[in-house]
Image (cartoon, rainbow, N blue to C red):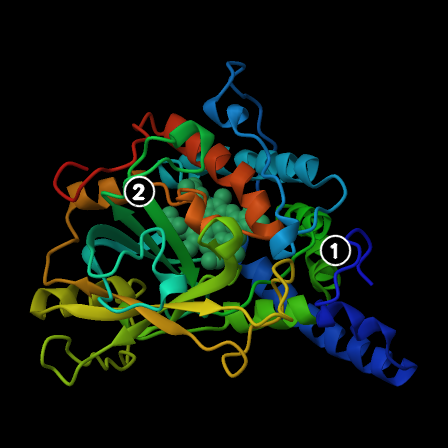
Amino acid sequence: MNKTILNDPARPGRTDSEGTSGTWLRQMAVTLVLAMAVALVACEKTPSYLAHSERPDAPRPHAQIPYPRIDPFLGEQLHEGEEQVAQKIAVLMEQAIQETPRKYGMAIRDAHPKAHGCVQAQFHVERNLPPGLATGVFQPGHTYEAWIRFSNSNADPGQADITGDGRGMAVKLMGVPGEKILETEREATTQDFVMISHPVFIMDDPTDYLTFQRKMTSASWVDKVLLPFTLGVKGSWNALQITTKTIENPVQARYWSMVPYQLGTGRERQAIKFSAKPFSDSGQSCPDIRDEFPSDPEPNFLRTALRRTLAGGKACMQFLIQPRASFMSVENSQDEWNESDAPFIRVATIEIPRQEFDTPEKNRHCEDLSFNPWHALPEHRPLGAVNRLRKVIYPHISESRHMLNAAPRIEPRSLSEK
Ligand code: HEM
């Protein structure tokens, strides 16, 4: 049973440790093997951060953002001290990014710092949608302009693309009317959907995440070796799956929200996850893109593949919604919502037209964008502990990054206006 969350019936992953001693020994053996694998990956990839020395004293906008209230109707449950834990993680991450200008010449994202490119897109909502799904931005037949940022997850922006890693796809719809959830950006006209190339996350306990972050940013070898014990068997397995992923082209991979979101408001609201998946219609409008790995991959071959694809034509993806089955938990981020129990339903087509995105000006604009799952209408409210932490952390880190870069922090209103 999880130590801080109570009465959550749908957390099968947390009952593993209650098995026989044989099971326990097997788990220990697996954990030790994974410990070595993850420690090697972590030691190779994680920069060691120095303690930061300065922080502006002036109150910052993120300080006005209250911690999210939980929604028991959808099964949310608060962990002890969650809000304080979120603040501590944010401070640790801020310390980390304060070191990045010295290393990279500018402040970079704490996660997903390496972009393959920010591309312009159209998000076409399906004309026919089941009534329960036609809510929020999913207005049948509506088209939104969008920015999409493709990225690698690793904290090292110099990591070669052929190295296994989580791959990010962050979508920002523009021209979205209605008051948004984030208290400091209520008037913004954007709705973000943030995804990674794996269906599940590494953990769902905030305190474990803080310990994980401390160990990740520690200079000590011992801390790195102990990382898998913080993640546990399931978390280490998920981490291994995420960090060993290689892809041929950013528009040829599938991406998932990993964690759940609300869909709709009032008594009709439900919990869902979402996903984006490559789509072709036998070359009529959306071509089939089937790149292979280059035989001698250059470090940024994913940017090259994206540039080549979009210089020659467009790319399409389907945007899918997965309404949960009643037994699935919104607090458990480590277990997949199996498609056989909860099928995905297509709600939109993402069209990425032919374009040239790889210019200094566009790459600079890409760096200055901020994606945040809480850039959302109430109909798409993020759910679960991981998402609640993100409400504190993303604005805090994005603000620090923009302050360090003396860059404006603005939600774009259209593709032309920025
Ligand atoms: C507590 C858990 C998490 C923490 C602390 C965290 C932290 C962060 C931070 C600090 C950033 C950079 C924000 C910025 O500078 O603008 C970021 C970016 C990102 N995160 Fe997370 N994250 C978490 C969970 C997740 C999950 C579950 C996903 C799954 C979809 C995810 C996907 C991404 C992606 C794709 C980006 C890059 C967005 C972009 O292109 O700008 N993160 N994360």
Q: Is residue 27 above or below residue 45?
A: below
Residue 109 visible? The answer is no
- Give the mark, 2 or 1, whose residue is nearer the N terminus: 2
Q: Position of residue 201 (x, y in %)?
A: 57, 63
Question: Quick check: marks 2 and 1 in contact, CB under 8 Å?
Answer: no
Q: Is residue 3 above or below residue 79?
A: below
In which quadrant of the rendered image does the N terminus lie?
A: bottom right
Is disc 2 placed on a helix, strand or loop?
strand
Quadrant of residue 372 within the rendered picture? top left
Determine which of the numbered discs, if any, sits on residue 222 in the image: 1
Label 1 sits on what residue type?
Val
At x 51%, y 63%, the residue is 258
Q: Position of residue 34 (x, y in %)?
A: 68, 73
Q: Please state which of residues 329 and 316 is positioned toward the viewer in this rendering.
A: 329
List the residue tagged with mark 2.
Answer: 190
- Asked if residue 113 lies left or right of residue 202, the reply is left
At x 60%, y 53%, the residue is 384
